[in-house]
Amino acid sequence: MPTTHEALSSLFSRTMIKTRKETPNRAVSVNHDLLIRGNFIRQEAAGIYTILPLGRRVLNNIENIIRHHLNELGSVELTLPALHPKNLWEQTGRWDTVDVLYKVQSKFGKKYVLAATTEEIATPLAKDHIKSYRDLPLSFYSINNKYRDEARAKSGIIRNREFGMKDMYSFHASPEDFAQYYKKVLETYMQIFADCGINAKITEASGGEYTVAATHEFMAISEAGEDEIICCEECSFAQNIEVSGYHEGDKCPKCGEKLKTEKAIEIGHIFDLGIKFSNDFNLKFVDRNGTLQPVFMGCYGIGTTRLMGAVVEIHYDERGIVWPEKLAPYNCHLVGLNMEDSNVNRVAFTLYEYLARKHISVLFDEREKVSPGRKFSDADLIGIPIRLIISKRTVQKNSIEITDRVSGKSEVIPLDKFYRQINQDNFESLK
Amino acid sequence: MPTTHEALSSLFSRTMIKTRKETPNRAVSVNHDLLIRGNFIRQEAAGIYTILPLGRRVLNNIENIIRHHLNELGSVELTLPALHPKNLWEQTGRWDTVDVLYKVQSKFGKKYVLAATTEEIATPLAKDHIKSYRDLPLSFYSINNKYRDEARAKSGIIRNREFGMKDMYSFHASPEDFAQYYKKVLETYMQIFADCGINAKITEASGGEYTVAATHEFMAISEAGEDEIICCEECSFAQNIEVSGYHEGDKCPKCGEKLKTEKAIEIGHIFDLGIKFSNDFNLKFVDRNGTLQPVFMGCYGIGTTRLMGAVVEIHYDERGIVWPEKLAPYNCHLVGLNMEDSNVNRVAFTLYEYLARKHISVLFDEREKVSPGRKFSDADLIGIPIRLIISKRTVQKNSIEITDRVSGKSEVIPLDKFYRQINQDNFESLK
């Protein structure tokens, strides 16, 4: 049907959006409730979800923001497999020590680990490409699904058994070169999260089982969080409550303001891996003096589906999701009312086609015999920032109504003026 | 480093291309040998591969060609999970009958199947969205990794244990509506394969364990194929040798020409699923008369990594891969010779930046102290259709050398003329 615009835009009736009458059930979690009612995801089992067409578009936006920033950093994308041979996990001593591993037994005798993390593949792969100091630094990333045998999947798509993840690995000739890159990644992560509408707080955490040194966690403040942090609202100071010596009400050591405790969702985690995995796989390089030296390694994760969940936990109101502009599944939501009227139908379809030609993506609610109330509540739930309304009333006045999802403010402007503005490439300023 | 062009273009030294001196080992298979030596893939275990940056770009092209055509068909993309709960596979009776299933046992008692195919998820999902005849037809697709516990992984990336797959499912109110859609998919598949440089032959096959009716297979003629078909070179006639009553040398029943037998790789397979899975999951719809009716279902697969392997089996010569234009990892391969020379360096980098600004993607071999012979043989192996050469000699003459990977023909033209042509947006005609 949509032959000209293909994936750019979409008719409501063809986007697998099932409108629901149920009342919200936020007892589980906000993101679970809104993402399921909004038709972004479907739960198949505890901790296992299908990403529906609307969710796929949001996730594409998240992944592309990550790609944009990591490519700018000079990293390069590849795709690591999920089935890892047992012997690689024995080589790192993690076959028996990591407790969330799903293990797979082939009927032909082979044993595998389902990727819970990917150092066991990334390190031997890097070894192919690193011979001398001229091959360093090296950085690559992979965006794919991870698997963890969690005792309890919870919080919607925040803690799942199968989940989307971006893992980046970097390889360096010295701890100094690593430290410099690590700092750049830290800044890049803040940009990625800002693009996703999250002002992240950075906390230090202990290394845990995958690392040998301190690590940094990126925290999104939210009531849905499993972590608790103590932080300052005025500056960037933040510490995990479990390791901090500070308490609520103490003076911030950076700016002197009062500290407060907040719940937070971990949305990113970066690690200094030192030479742990280089040693396991004998990953060395020849330095300028011809001497063999160990490679210093870093690991940088962002849970992509979890990030989608965290964004919803932060950007919603009583009517539904309020997507940050860069994550919205479409640039705008065109609501056609009285679509049974041939004039309205023609005006709305003409606008739909025109917007798509101008590369403005549109979700077009073209359904007939659906009440305005239902259409508006569906639009509120789905949460696209800009709503355009064409109805019998606007057509009679040769006008269009534009509504901002955040403020709820509406404006009626002449349709020809709207067309002229679209021509002038200033769509975003219409809000 | 590449801050302006990001992912569009890439420096050779940052693309994880390891140049190799080994002589070819085509004993295994052409695609295995060329894709590994060309740094498109890395084998992690039998049947399990990492997709390296160059391979990632080819696979992106394949996936985007598929998306383009399926979106035009009115299908919509979503992402199905790989971990399937056991109970869904029991409901279809396939938990015990499909012999290639990887089964996963959680330590918390739950059992899963790793997606070998996805009817068990797709059908209940469709049931959410299909209530009445107004919800039909429905079509969606998912591109992700599949898992099959094959006795022998073989032929490079043709038969793997973990592999990329596009699965589409369609749902219809009647066998007639299904048949019409099936025919459209069949035509669309031919366009997809044509875009990938393959003139596919269509054969009928028996349903096999996943279906109840005849199916159609799309075959790429290649010595590497596991199947044998009898077909006509003059027309589209083709049959699988195992079910055909015809023999080599017989007259083609369609055009009268002589038939011949060929080896072929199965690159796509489409199925009439009838009401098998609708019955298993009680997927019904209310027709115009208010009567509950079963939904008719079709399934349409393309192995994306296998398709990459098949393309290489068809498009190569003694020097390496010869990518079809739409699959090449970059639009062109810019070879800088004598890069130690500051003039050459400047001219080559200027051109690199310029091409990227014009949205022509470039792999730029900017390595210093690497011989022209090595650079050319690397370029031949990687197989990008258009090669641009900047060297001390071309710089002295204010010219550029353009070579076609297929014909090997070279042309030297004035550099300013080349820049003008690029401006005129006729890059492809330069070949």
Image: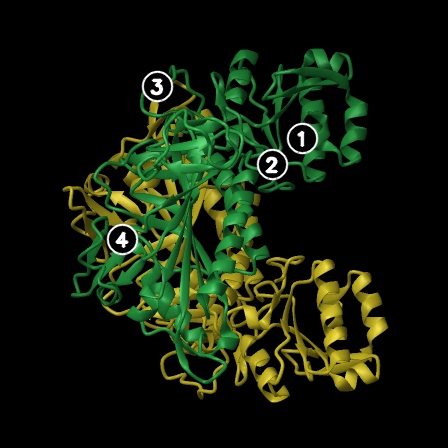
Chain colours: A yellow, B green
- Structural crowding at the residue carrying mark 3, measured as other residues with C-alpha within 10 Å and reported as few (<14), some (14–19) or many (≥20): few
Q: Residue B158 sits in which quadrant?
A: top left
Q: How far is mark 3 from mark 4, CA to CA?
A: 37 Å
Who is closer to the viewer here, A385 or B279?
B279
Which residue in the protein does label 3 denote?
B25
Mark closest to the chain's N terminus, 1 or 4: 4
Amino acid bearing label 4: Glu
Residue A253 visible: no
Residues marked 4 and 2 touching at CB (< 8 Å): no
User: Circle 3 — which element?
Assistant: loop
| Residue B354 in the image: above or below residue B124 | above
Which residue in the protein does label 2 denote?
B9
For disc 1, the chain is: B
Q: How far is mark 2 from mark 1, CA to CA?
A: 8 Å
Q: Which mark is residue B352?
A: 1
Mark closest to the chain's N terminus, 2 or 1: 2
Amino acid bearing label 1: Tyr
User: Circle 1 — which element?
Assistant: helix
Tag in front: 3 or 4? 4
Amino acid bearing label 3: Asn
Residue B252 visible: yes
Which residue in the protein does label 4 denote?
B209
Who is closer to the viewer here, B289 or B321?
B289
Residues marked 2 and 3 touching at CB (< 8 Å): no
Q: How far is mark 1 from mark 4, CA to CA?
A: 53 Å
- Structural crowding at the residue carrying mark 1, measured as other residues with C-alpha within 10 Å and reported as few (<14), some (14–19) or many (≥20): many
Mark closest to the chain's N terminus, 4 or 2: 2
> How many numbered discs sit on the rendered protein?
4
Are the numbered discs 2 and 3 placed on the same chain, yes or no? yes
Residue plotted at (78% across, 28% down): B419
Amino acid bearing label 2: Ser
